[in-house]
Image (cartoon, coloured by chain):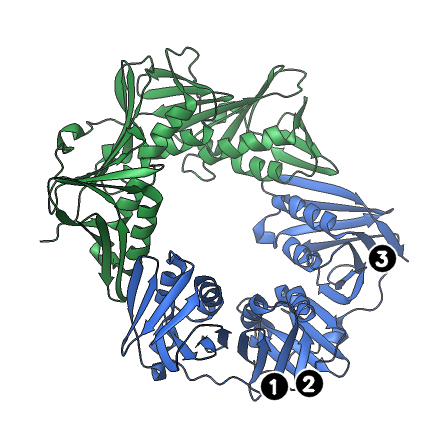
Chain colours: A blue, B green
Amino acid sequence: MKVLVPKKSLAETLARVERIVPSRSSNPGLSLLRIDVSEDGMELSGSNMDVDIRARFAADSPGRGSYAVLGHVFSQVVRALPSDDVELEFAEDELQLRSGGFATKLQLMAPGSAPVLNFATEFSGALDAPRFARGLAAVKYAAAVADFQAVFRGVKLELADGRTRTVATDGFRLAYFDIAESSGLQADIIVPARSVEELLRVLDEGEVKLALEPGQLSVQHGNYALNLKLMEGTFPDYERVIPKNFPVSITLGSTRLAEAVARVALMADKTTNNRVDLFIKDGELQITAEGSFGRSQEAIPVIQEGTDSEIGLAYNSKYLVDAVAPVNGDVRLSFSGTNSAPSVITDLGDPSYLAMVVPLRTA
Amino acid sequence: MKVLVPKKSLAETLARVERIVPSRSSNPGLSLLRIDVSEDGMELSGSNMDVDIRARFAADSPGRGSYAVLGHVFSQVVRALPSDDVELEFAEDELQLRSGGFATKLQLMAPGSAPVLNFATEFSGALDAPRFARGLAAVKYAAAVADFQAVFRGVKLELADGRTRTVATDGFRLAYFDIAESSGLQADIIVPARSVEELLRVLDEGEVKLALEPGQLSVQHGNYALNLKLMEGTFPDYERVIPKNFPVSITLGSTRLAEAVARVALMADKTTNNRVDLFIKDGELQITAEGSFGRSQEAIPVIQEGTDSEIGLAYNSKYLVDAVAPVNGDVRLSFSGTNSAPSVITDLGDPSYLAMVVPLRTA
């Protein structure tokens, strides 16, 4: 059977699917990409156990068939094809790709060797894709990378009536983002932060359809369908640790703050958690850092509010920079007290976002 | 003493010098960057033992002084400076940098702790910088990376009357480039390929001044001065192995050939030296490769010349792609015989360049 596809659709779709399908795995079936051809077009699907993905695109095909091929080999060849059009000829155990003067024969496996994936067909939930993407992208930095309790490596989705909230925390910092929209679903679920990364690559304009199934969130968007395996465990009761009273708060440009912290922090030693010190007095923020190579400081005028006239705190500079990054325009830093009392970072132009950072103990 | 410099000149110059000065070294003096300030401007200098570099740029200075500072720390701080202008205040054992609201203090060392470098002041040779750069860039790929006799890791410069030739070979392939210009020097010298890389980063428009001193080539170009340590040893007598008679030769677009070889070679196994087979017959070049994942082929129409009507040879695809890369426009491949008889690659539009590749033994 001969199928004709534009190289562009095939290559772009493969680039997304290839990220999920592992090029090496102790389970050899996982390295396989399943190809389903029908009169309507082509479907590519694969899985890394945490994320299943299926992508559809138009193709000129005379019939139906299901095949499996080594994902990373197929992707490499497709990327290098010389012409704008590709002919895929599927035979018993061989796939021949032709493009311009180039031809290649790849070994085909039985479609049953690839993982069996089931994608939802009915969706009781939906969200605006760009807003959902913004909510996920704004908080994922706060999830733990490793060496933590499993739930800390996930992003919690609070799917409630009239509100959808994304939350992540590693115990030292926290971020949440409120999407002022009902998904139509009601549940609290935790998605691994790595799966969130893959979902974000697929989200584009338009609507995302959502379905909750036992142990997974199913997502359909444009030509893509994904199943995201959920994490088990109890997410910490984070709201009660977010302080409400702030003796001092300051407002300044978010880029100005992030750049200054990163610049001053160059002098900080890694052995001290990249410590930078913030000192606020008389409408001026003084940022300092000291290490074995020298000492840096930078002063920035800020709008200062609150009951106390000055405050000084130390932070892991990376945590501050990460927490400020999702803020466009002006950022407000609110200090709940001295030493390790948490500080809160909000976006002056968008109340949806809140981040909390626990200062370093300096005593 | 306070010195004023534009951030741009300082940062751009440092980016070049920083590459040479090692950030870690068993000899701690090598990590130091020497700073010489005078009424004329600033000089930064450093060395990695193979290459000494000195860069000059204009600065507003009230006097003279010599200092040393940790190169990588100074560079990191300069790159991050917030304003277009920098004030450097040199004190006894401390350098204070100020830019915008930012200030940093770095520890200064005695200038004598940095390596003592001597740069040539008289130059008896010269070359056009872009042509010298082209000659070096066209051949450096053919030098060995490691595990070979030392001279194979160098680029030979044949500085002769009326001709300057660059040559590199790793024993399996060779490339030379004739710069149709006298340098004014007469000598055969070998420069480590890594030092050639650093020289290439500095070469720009205009003239390069050259001086030969015992064990080193001194180069002055624009604001930069470099000393390149020379390699000892005897470069192989390569000219006698370049074949002169070719039963078959073909001509085709260099990009077309390089892309096709790279594409077909995706199927080649690394254990077979990325083997691709070239077969020429009736004005058509057929490129094939086979490996554990499948088989690829591509046919390209070529202009075929010579006494034999067909020829077939196998190559390491990487060697072919490298050898063709310096050719703009059409490339000629000339085959001296079957099996491991060397093939010669020339640029149809520029006789300065010649490459030789030894085919893989297939018997």
- Quadrant showing the N terminus of chain A: bottom left
User: Can you say whether A182 is above or below A203 in the image?
Assistant: below
Q: Quadrant of residue B131?
A: top left
Closer to us: B351 or B17: B351
Q: Residue B130 appears at what percent x and percent y? A: 42, 25
Where does label 2 land, which residue? A185
Q: Residue A128 appears at what percent x and percent y? A: 69, 73
Q: Which of marks 2 and 1 is nearer the N terminus?
A: 2
Where does label 1 land, which residue? A212
User: Can you say whether A198 is above or below B75 in the image?
Assistant: below
User: Can you say whether B76 is above or below B236 in the image?
Assistant: below
The answer to whether B170 appears left or right of A357 in the picture is left
Give the spatial CA distance, label 1 vs label 3.
43 Å
Q: Residue at x 61, y 20 (%)?
A: B58
Label 2, secondary structure: give it.
loop
Amino acid beneath label 1: Leu
Is residue B346 among the parts visible in the rendering?
A: yes
Label 3, secondary structure: give it.
strand
Q: Quadrant of residue B119?
A: top left
Circle number at residue A165: none
Where does label 3 land, which residue? A248
